[in-house]
Image (cartoon, grey):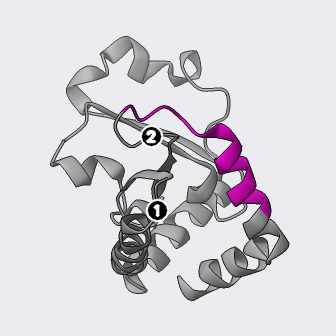
Amino acid sequence: MQYCGTTWACDLFGVRPDILVAGKALGGGVPIGVVAARADLIDDAIESEPWNILTFMNQPLAAAAGLAVLDIVAEERLAERARDLGARATERFRALAQGSAVIGDVRGPGLFVGIDYVLDTGTREPATAACADAWQYAARRGLHRRLAVATQLLR
């Protein structure tokens, strides 16, 4: 959710969505899915018979978990923290890319940082083997532990 640097990704682009769909992270471990729509998009027939569009509804535990997660995200400023950490990470990856012939692009909002591995920066042909090698290199050096630490830093 907040890893993109805003609570909702649509906020990155100043978009007010007609329909917003959320799930998984919203429940903080409790299964939840949300479909939120502008009121004018929901006609009376759907409103009077919501079972037509929902598999599960009226789950107080899931609703409480979702509200608690949203409160924590706001109170602990997790989206802002992700934006700041992501900017630092992106800056470091871009500096690394300056000395690398295999990194074609570094981009992404917040902690959703994407790095393109390319065979040639001109053609931008994907360097699939180099990407796999980088992943194995990182895994051998404990990337999964560092990711777990980074996740804890967001809290």
Q: Residue at x 84, y 71 (%)?
A: 140
Q: Residue at x 19, y 47 (%)?
A: 13
Q: Residue at x 42, y 16 (%)?
A: 46
Q: Is 81 placed left or right of 118 in the picture?
A: left
Magenta stretch contains residue 104: no
Disc on the earlier residue, 1 or 2? 1
Classify residue 60 by image quadrant. Answer: bottom right
Residue 38 placement (x, y as % from top left): 25, 33
Q: Which residues are magenta?
A: 123-136
User: For residue 87, which numbered disc appears in the image?
Assistant: none
User: For residue 100, which numbered disc appears in the image?
Assistant: 1
Question: Element at badge 1?
Answer: loop
Q: Give amino acid for label 1.
A: Ser
Q: Which residue extends farthest top?
A: 45
Residue 69 placement (x, y as % from top left): 53, 69
The residue carrying mark 2 is: 120
Question: Element at badge 2?
Answer: loop
Between 91 and 4, which is closer to the camera in this rendering? 91
Residue 154 placement (x, y as % from top left): 53, 82
Q: Is residue 102 shown to the viewer in this render? A: yes
Q: Give amino acid for label 2.
A: Asp
